[in-house]
Amino acid sequence: MASFMIKPAYFRCVVRTGRLMNEHRTTDTLYPGRSYATEGDNRVPKIYTKTGDKGFSSTFTGERRPKEDHIFEALGNTDELSSAIGLAREFCLDKGHTFTYQLDKIQCILQDVGSNIATPRSTARESHIKKTTFTAQPIADLENWIDKFTEELPPLTNFILPSGGKGSAALHLARTVCRRAERSVAPIVRTGEADPDVAKFLNRLSDYLFTAARYAATKEGKEEKIYNRAE
Ligand SMILES: Nc1ncnc2c1ncn2[C@@H]1O[C@H](COP(=O)(O)OP(=O)(O)OP(=O)(O)O)[C@@H](O)[C@H]1O
């Protein structure tokens, strides 16, 4: 019988299923096609299944694809993005920035992004689609946060170089990873395999990260380096 457990590995495929041990665990790491622990099963599950050793892995729809498939590329980039945001968040927490709750929320949304990418529409059943639907609300949230930051920022008059303190520089780095995630998601969305709002979210997220980086530098009173053309 198929059942599910938590796997704290690097990519997190969010599966909302009635078969979960705890219904509220909607952002846990769950993998399709696995034999997972069920309620009352006290065995300590192993993190490795070895099923990926030959260079193939599974989509949420159960397809086996080579690890260099554009789906795993996009999943890896999304995962890297969440890690980069996690690091930036730590630096921002150290400085007492009040917007870190937004980074928390974004990391959760990135789980949903991953779930949507991991569920190619061509092989998805209705139940898969239902569990991995991506909504447009997070895009509106990002726009709202960007607008609020912008109200407090000096206008942009020069090219800004990644700088402005550790939090700011880390947010800039996350922005560049976000751009890569966006590039890798583009072909998947174009072929109709993932939701267009996923691409839209990533596009808006890089603007958010840019603005948040500037905001962090401003609040910390740190100088943002600007581009100077070499004479
Ligand atoms: N190299 C990778 N980059 C990005 N995503 C991956 C990669 N490998 C697997 N995935 C995705 O992440 C999910 C969980 O990763 P996991 O490491 O469990 O996969 P695996 O390599 O197939 O299995 P195992 O590590 O147990 O042999 C997979 O089901 C797949 O969707």
Image: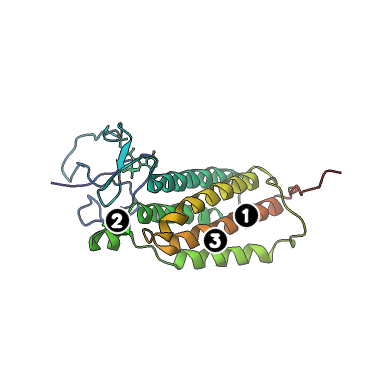
Reading the image, the residue beneath label 1 is: 210
Answer with mark 1 or mark 3, whichever residue precedes in sequence. 3
Reading the image, the residue beneath label 3 is: 204
Q: Amino acid at mark 3?
A: Arg
Cβ(mark 2) to ligand 1 < 8 Å? no
Determine the residue located farthest toward the left in the rendered image. 1
| Residue 174 at x, y percent in the picture | 56, 47
| Residue 91 at x, y percent in the picture | 59, 43
Determine the residue located farthest toward the front in the rendered image. 191
Q: Amino acid at mark 2?
A: His
| Residue 78 at x, y percent in the picture | 45, 48
Reading the image, the residue beneath label 2 is: 24
Between residues 99 and 190, which one lies in front from this camera angle? Answer: 190
Task: Between label 3 and label 2, give the one nearer the viewer.
Answer: 3
Relative to 25, 206 lies left or right: right
- Quarter holding the C terminus is top right
Give the Cα distance between marks 1 and 3.
10 Å
Give the Cα distance between marks 3 and 2.
28 Å
Q: Secondary structure at mark 2?
A: loop
Answer with mark 3 or mark 2, whichever residue precedes in sequence. 2
Q: Secondary structure at mark 1?
A: helix
Residue count near mark 3 (Cα–Cα under 10 Å), binned few <14, some 14–19, many ≥20? many
